[in-house]
Amino acid sequence: MKKFNIGVIGLGMGSTVLEINNITESGLEVVGICDKDLKKARNCQQSYGIKYLTDNYEELVENNEIDIIAVFSPDHLHAEHCIAALENGKHVICTKPMVTGLEDAKKIVKLVDDRKLKFLVGQTMRYEPQFKTIKKVYDDKELGDIISAEAHYVHDMRPVFKMTPWRLKVPQDLMYGGVCHPVDVLRWFLGDVQEVFAYSNRGKLEPEYQIDGNFMLNLKFKNGIIGRILGLYDIVHPPMPMMGVSIFGSRGSAIGSFSDKLGGEVKIVFDKFEEKVESRSVFPPETEGAYGHGATVIRYLKHFEYCLKNDQAPDPDVRQGAKSISVCSAAWESIKTGLPVKVLNDF
């Protein structure tokens, strides 16, 4: 079996990548880790039998024994770490958001092309079973011609700020760090976004967070479909699932939801049934067993391994990631100008 060695930068969510070492049928293995918290890193090293440990990412990306760099550092460092990895000839897996600015997205697309490397953006919602279920129904044309769609990602960020204070200190840009989830999901279904019109405000629940953290986006896709995105992060968490997507077609409508603690569901109504009977499927939370909450990470790691072995483009690849960043960039411009903004899709 061909093996690919991974180096992981950042052991927050990045610690979920380490579980691949316990999957015997995988050709991936984490052999190096980088984190500023060396005590935590040493514990991970011992638990997973990892060869290399450092608190300097440059040492990791320059290591000739490593084939893939998995970037799980804070959002604002993604560009720096991805660029360094690509310049050292490494394939890259980068958790969402790919970067936090359009110019960095352009640089990374060019580097991936020039070096002929593979780049996967870790958009976990594409790998959640409930959203994959709706995508299968959509791909099979069972919903007919799509008329409209919407998605939301809502999250009271105050507990997250306490666990990861860098989000307050930088501060984290929640358009890129949060809204990229529903943007990516709708783009996955409907393709390129042509135009965005957006609003934002500040919820003032976390006084230390001094930029807007609540967003509403209206989208017009190139195929004429209209869409809407709700991204609220400076709120008291509402009695609704954290993530959701709704697809409205000429033959039926489908709604899917996700919550890390409660699991999710898919509800579909087909127009062919006169009674409009609702079909409902429940998806339990993936909080137990070998992989826990990192199950989706393991899924996209396996997908990336397949792409490496079969020379295929990952899903989402670097261009798909860049296009989602472009939507977020256009939304910020719309908020600042009060006007609809065209989205760059030519990468």
Image (cartoon, grey):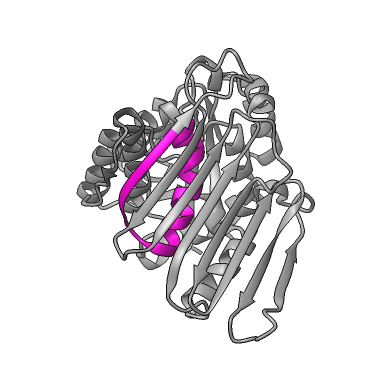
Q: Is residue 171 above or below residue 222?
A: above
**198 part of magenta stretch:** yes
- Compared with residue 35, is residue 94 higher up or lower down, i.e. above or below? below
Q: Residue 262, how many percent across, how many down?
A: 77, 50
Q: Is residue 19 something that shows in the picture?
A: yes
x%, y% of residue 274? 65, 86
Drawn side of residue 193 relative to residue 162, left or right: left
| Furthest residue toward front | 274
The relative height of residue 190 versus residue 13 in the rendered view (above or below) is below
Q: What kind of secondary structure does the magenta stretch mostly adopt?
A: helix
Query: Which residues are drawn in magenta?
Result: 174-199
Whether residue 95 appears in this view of the structure is no
Q: Position of residue 20 (x, y in %)?
A: 61, 51
- In the displayed structure, does residue 186 sit left or right of residue 327? right
For residue 187: magenta?
A: yes
Q: Residue at x 74, y 43 (%)?
A: 239
Which residue sits at x=22%, y=44%?
Answer: 110
Residue in the foreground of this view, choosing between 6 and 92: 92
Quarter of the figure with residue 302: bottom right
* Residue 145 vs residue 135, the one in the foreground: 145
